[in-house]
Amino acid sequence: MSTPLLEISGLTRRFGGLIAVDNVSLALMPGEIMGLLGPNGSGKSTVLNLISGALRPDVGSIRLDGHEIGNSAPHRIARLGVARTFQLVRILPSLNCRENVLAGIAFGRDALWGHAAEQRAETLLARVGLAGRAATATGELTYIDQKRLELARALALDPQLLLLDEWLAGLNPSELQQGIALVRSLRGEGMTILLVEHVMDAIRSLCDRCIVMNAGRKIAEGAPDAVLSEAEVIRAYLGDDDA
């Protein structure tokens, strides 16, 4: 039996008197896509921030491939093979597409330089649907293409674990299907993915398992259809009057 790539135990993070993440535990197996669901403000993005090192836990353990990373700096976690995208797209506006990806390559597990790095950047841009756009200024990109670029920069780290924070949000129906296919293909290449998402078509299409959070706590875990039909999950999304 394989061991988890990511194992979180008793994770807690407070902001003053607010408990944003409250004793959350999960295990993510190699090659799995897990959805992290819940209404706005439930603590999902905070969990991603804790895994990626943007925040440090008050209590609890975060283990990647058996190694504790809960108190490591973000650049060290990136070099161990964790990459992410953000709920609000974060690209480097003063750099073109190639240069954005090169910035990711420089911080990857096996950093490349010079011509090899440029070739790798071109390959990654093509991988996400931006072939031929290497010299394009980021200000000329559409919203979906900005998301593609951010994903290419994340993939430039050569991650074991990819954290996607609402990467599929805001896409039109055809873009959504392209995005779902792209994420599925990454899993086909052996990548492990934890995704925060509100698009239920994507959750049902992509996820092996889901965890649902509400008010910082984990309230459900299991296969997508089973989890989404649980009464407590419906109440979390719709409120008691509509459940």
Image (spheres, helix red, strand yellow):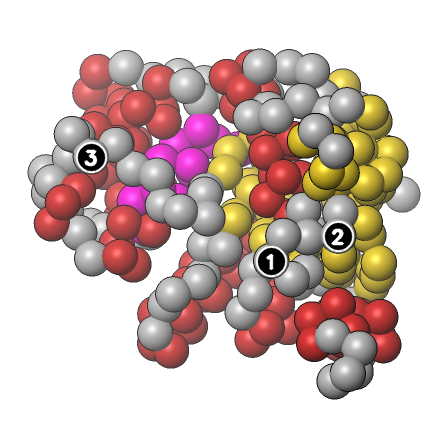
Give how far apart the Cα atoms at labels 3 and 2 are.
Answer: 34 Å
Magenta segment, principal secondary structure? helix
> Which residue matches tag 3?
93
Type of amino acid at the residue the image marks with label 1: Asn
> Which residue matches tag 2?
215
Residue 195, percent across and down? 59, 52
Residue 159 shows in the view: yes
Residue furthest to the front: 17
Point 45% across, 43% down: residue = 86
Q: What number of labels is visible? A: 3
Q: Which quarter shows the C terminus?
A: bottom right
Marks 3 and 1 in Cβ contact (< 8 Å): no
> Magenta segment range?
148-159
Type of amino acid at the residue the image marks with label 2: Ala
Q: In which quadrant of the rendered view does residue 137 lie?
A: top left
Q: Work out whether residue 188 or residue 40 is closer to the camera in this orientation and state it.
A: 40
Point 45% across, 42% down: residue = 85
